[in-house]
Image (cartoon, helix red, strand yellow):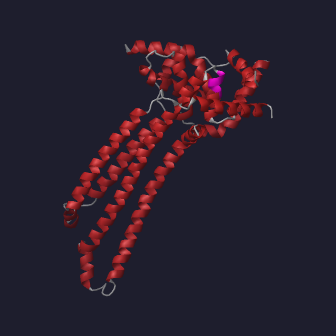
Amino acid sequence: MSQQLEAEFVKQLEENQNIVHKICRLYTNDKDAHNDLFQEVTIQLWKAYPKFRGDAKFSTWMYRVALNTAITLYRKSTRRVKTTAYESVQFKVTDMQEDDESAEQLTLLYGAVKQLNDIEKALVFLYLEDKNYKEISATLGISEVNARVKMNRVKTKLTNIINP
Amino acid sequence: MDQLDILKEKWNSQDTEYPHYTTDTIKGLLAKKSTSIVKWLLIIAIIEFAVMTGINFIYSMVGSPDEFTQHMMDSNFVKISWVIHVIAIIYFIFLFYKNYKNISATQPTRSLMKNIIKTRKTMKWYIWYNIIGGFISGIMTTIYMLNNHPLINELMASGKMDGHETMFYVIAFLALTVMYIIFLGFIYLVYMLIYGILLKRLKGNYEELKRMEV
């Protein structure tokens, strides 16, 4: 039974893993930390999985657990913070190698979103993922009106970062 | 259409950018240990309970219980405070367990943070309880010892302290009190430091969410 549950979980995560990768990329600066956070998200998802009753879509449920892990539960190691500057450059260079204008713009976007704080990142991420304000407010635990107000502020902030 | 909407389209057109984990890799990850702050909170809490109980235990067991210590241990004051202490520990463990059980990654972010902070608060109260309790029992022991300890009685009877009795008591009392304060202050600082480092980011994020609600 538990093996069946595990197989089911692994399959669903494998299919939806891009959600986690996007969050990892927003909240970490190098590949080690990315993999580390991915691992922690996987563990937290698995831990919470028995409570997942299928009353929501797996992916919807994943957003909440993954964001909570990135914002609240995950602990950045100090060793990594020190090497961030160097490795983030490396990480970006690898992305640029695709030499594709669209990829370049995406890197630019990531760069801008990364300058936001943890909560603002979550708001922007959910917005980019096409979540409505009802879902955003439910995920973060704030009111819908406040989510809207904050989102507008973050939009302005982001525009200012991209077009200084 | 604002700039962010243009970006949104770009965002949604990205596909192959990310590493792809196979089902086998994911399966491997499931066996790994979590390093979440909740786990650290639990570890620290267990250490706290162990250290505090350990200190109390050593305190009452250290050295061979001579007649004087034995007499003190048999006093009603010590017996009653021991019972209160055991009840308090059980109560704190119950509170901690209750808070800990409430922490779930499936909650809205704000409730999750709130629950973690609540758990940490329980531990803070536990530390304070021990510091205040340790201080009171330290002072009581000092007063009792200065009045009843055979060595001090002997010293007083020897006549060496004639004329300086009050001075002796005041200095001895103050010296021991300062010692307790330094020791307990040190314990407090260690815990504040550990929690401070552990929960700094969480506190910042929680404040940010709270600010949004104003």
Residue B110 rendering spot, x and y as whole percentages: 52, 34
Across and down, in percent, residue B93 comes to 34, 42
Coordinates of residue B208 in the picture (x, y in percent)? 59, 39
Name the quadrant containing residue B77: bottom left
Which quarter of the figure is the N terminus of chain B placed in? top right
Q: Relative to A14, does residue B106 appear above or below in the rendering?
A: below
In the rendered view, does A137 fall on the left or right side of B61? right
In the figure, B188 relative to A131: above or below? below
Q: Nearer the viewer, residue B121 or B163?
A: B121
Compared with A102, B197 (above or below) is below
| Residue found 72% across the figure and 18% down from its top | B10
Visible residue check, residue A93: no
Report the label total: 0
* Left or right, B69 with reference to A61: left
Q: Nearer the viewer, residue A61 or A146?
A: A146
Q: Nearer the viewer, residue B34 or B1?
A: B1
Which residue is rendered at x = 60% and y = 24% of the image?
Answer: A133
Q: Residue furthest bottom?
A: B163
Magenta highlight: main SS: helix
Q: Is residue A126 magenta?
A: yes
Rendered location of residue B163, percent (x, y): 32, 87
Q: Specify the segment rendered in magenta.
A: A124-128
* Residue B177 to residue A155: above or below: below
Seen in the image, is B156 located left or right of residue B132? Answer: left
Can residue A35 be seen at all in this image of the molecule?
yes
Quarter occupied by residue A164: top right
The reply to whether the magenta stretch includes residue B194 is: no
Quadrant (top left/top right/bottom left/bottom right) for the C terminus of chain B: top right
